[in-house]
């Protein structure tokens, strides 16, 4: 995990010192993004993963590697799309649109967040099935997102604050990974793109935009 690798904590179970908390990263969700894309667009045999290597966690490898591993098992070609500007995004999306059997995944990235309207508009223009790691993309018109449940993270963090204020040492409290996630689907976008959301996927949705 990032905290241990960067020397912030001795381990997740026993961080020691004055460090503890809750992570807002979970690499294995990359497999879920790919799974959702295949559920909605079974025809895809390629997936492009868009991110800025200068701002994404571990240069993008944190999420891309699990996606690539899951794609390999399904005989799907996974290719990274590194972007560093709005122009890069437009160029990368135009190149992606030339492929008829491709889907797109955007990983959590502080660069992509303010460019979400551009990313979303291009996926709609080019009719590319799109899964995101941030729910805000679906609210902006993106097709589907599977994101960490931020409300649950705050609720769990509040319990740690209470325990620390009562005298427990932060370093004795394990750093915890996300345990609850939110699935959001934009049915309006799905209809515009000609995709039918399978009933089993729709039944699992926490937020549906119509």
Image (spheres, helix red, strand yellow):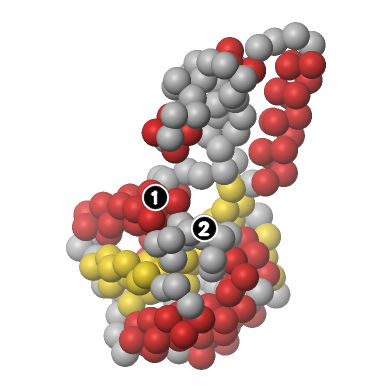
Would you name the residue on which mark 1 appears? 58
**Badge nearest the viewer, 1 or 2:** 1
Residue 206 lies, in percent from the top left, at 66, 55
Check if mark 1's residue and mark 2's residue have beta carbons within 8 Å: no
As measured in the structure, the alpha-carbon distance from the residue carrying label 1 to the one carrying label 2 is 12 Å
Residue 65 image point, x, y percent:
30, 52
Rendered position, 121 above or below 40? below
| Most distant residue in the top direction | 167
The quarter of the image holding the C terminus is bottom right
- Residue 144: which quarter of the image? bottom right
In this view, 25 is above or below 41: above
Identify the residue at image location x=57%, y=81%.
118
Quarter of the image where one finds residue 184: bottom right
Question: Residue 96 falls in which quadrant of the image?
Answer: bottom left
Q: Which residue is mark 2?
A: 108
- What residue is shown at x 51% (from left), y 44% (from top)? 25
* Residue depicted at x 55% and y 26%: 175
97 versus 30 height, above or below: below
Left of 165 or right of it: where is 209?
left
Structural crowding at the residue carrying mark 1, measured as other residues with C-alpha within 10 Å and reported as few (<14), some (14–19) or many (≥20):
few
Residue 135 visible, this angle: yes
Return the disc, 1 or 2, that comes first in the chain's sequence. Answer: 1
Q: Which SS class for mark 2?
A: loop
Residue 83 is left or right of residue 169, and the answer is left
Report the front residue among 155 and 85.
85
Screen quadrant of the N terminus: top left
**Disc 2 packing (10 Å; few <14; some 14–19; many ≥20):** many
| x then y, percent, for residue 108 | 51, 58
Give the image location of residue 183, x and y in percent. 59, 56
Badge count:
2
């Amino acid at each position: 995990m990032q905290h241990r690798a960067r020397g912030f904590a001795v381990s997740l179970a026993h961080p020691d010192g004055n460090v503890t908390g809750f992570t807002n990263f979970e690499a294995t969700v990359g497999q879920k993004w790919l799974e959702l894309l295949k559920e909605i667009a079974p025809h895809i045999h390629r997936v492009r993963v868009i991110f800025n290597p200068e701002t994404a966690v571990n240069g993008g490898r944190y999420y891309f590697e699990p996606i690539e591993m899951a794609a390999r098992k399904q005989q799907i070609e996974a290719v990274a799309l590194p972007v560093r500007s709005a122009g890069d995004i437009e160029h990368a999306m135009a190149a992606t649109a030339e492929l008829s059997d491709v889907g797109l995944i955007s990983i959590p990235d502080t660069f992509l967040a303010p460019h979400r309207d551009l990313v979303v508009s291009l996926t709609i223009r080019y009719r590319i099935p799109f899964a995101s790691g941030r729910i805000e993309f679906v609210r902006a018109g993106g097709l589907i997102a599977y994101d960490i449940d931020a409300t649950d993270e705050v609720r769990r963090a509040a319990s740690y604050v209470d325990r620390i204020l009562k005298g427990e040492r932060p370093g004795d409290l394990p750093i915890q990974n996300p345990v609850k996630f939110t699935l959001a689907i934009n049915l309006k976008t799905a209809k515009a793109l000609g995709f039918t959301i399978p009933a089993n996927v729709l039944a699992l949705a926490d937020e549906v935009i119509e």
